[in-house]
Amino acid sequence: MLIKNESELVGIKKISEVVAITLKKMCEYAKVGMSTKELDDFGAEVLKSYGAKSAPYATYKFPGWACISIDKEFCHGIPSDKRILREGELINIDVSAELGGYYSDNGCSFVVGEDVHNHQPLVNASKEILKIAIEHIKEGVRIADIGEMIEKESKKRGYKVIKNLAGHGVGRRLHEPPHEILNYKNRLNYEKFKRNSVVAIETFISTHSTIAETLSDGWTMVGNKGGYMTQHEHTIVVTDGAPLILTTGNGVWD
């Protein structure tokens, strides 16, 4: 989406605030012993209180309000009353929603309870790399160069990136051009970030895998070589200077 007037900016800001608040509240609500369905139901009530609709459900008929991925699930995990959160597990919550014809998207990985499996360094790396990437985004910057930066920063920390998951444009739909804001440099992609465009920037930082594969449920993705992955995501507006981060309320960098 390219923002053309003040009313469009107001609209995208409003839904971005809603998804950010919902994500933050879900992260705070998640506790050991809770089912992912209970956590999803809580998020659903927060979205409903603002009049917002789940974007994955509305767009793709995803069987849940938010994607909740646990342990070695990388993304698109389906909420279930049978999946109980355990001490020290890695969890990713991805919240996207629609309100008034506008869509926004954000996500966060964190450790549930005490970090008994030492996942925190991977979580921290993802947060730090997202911050570095966003700080370098402005009008005229090549999308591929941001991908190269993300991969280099990951390698510095001893990690890999997932190459078939990507950030994307967002605004009037959940997924819009540019569709491939990758975590590595695609040398064939000469596209540049455009001023006033709305994009969701995501990190996909992993311990072992470079490709995410879909399980038999048709949604949940895991690594081709196993291991763990963390994802953090902000929706931003590209400017000719520092980007406008619309989902700062999610607490990713708190």
Image (cartoon, helix red, strand yellow):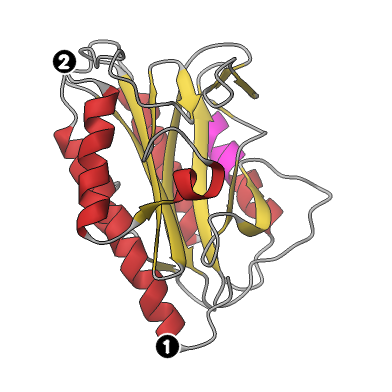
Return the mark for residue 56: none
Query: In the image, residue 241 lies at what x, y percent?
Result: 49, 76
Provide the residue designation for mark 2.
Answer: 33
Residue at (46%, 69%) from the top-left corner?
Answer: 101
The residue that mark 1 highlights is 6
User: Label 1: few (<14), some or many (≥20) within 10 Å?
Assistant: few
Q: Is residue 16 left or right of residue 171?
A: left
The amino acid beneath tag 1 is: Glu
Residue for point 61% across, 41% down: 183
Provide the secondary structure element on which disc 2 rests: loop
Look at the image and give the residue range highlighted in magenta: 150-155
Q: Residue 218, how many percent across, how many down?
A: 59, 23
Q: Quadrant of the N terminus?
A: bottom right
Residue displayed at 50% across by 31% down: 205
Tell me, yes or no, whether the highlighted magenta stretch contains residue 11.
Answer: no
- The amino acid type, in three-letter code, at marker 2 is Gly
Give the answer, above or below, for where 126 lies relative to 55.
above
- Whether residue 254 can be seen here: no
Could you say whether the residue bearing mark 1 is in a helix, strand or loop?
helix
Residue 164 lies in quadrant: top right
Residue 118 in the image, given as x and y percentages of width and height: 30, 15
Is 153 included in the stretch rendered in magenta? yes
Q: Examine the rendered structure and indicate whether residue 235 appears above or below residue 211.
A: below
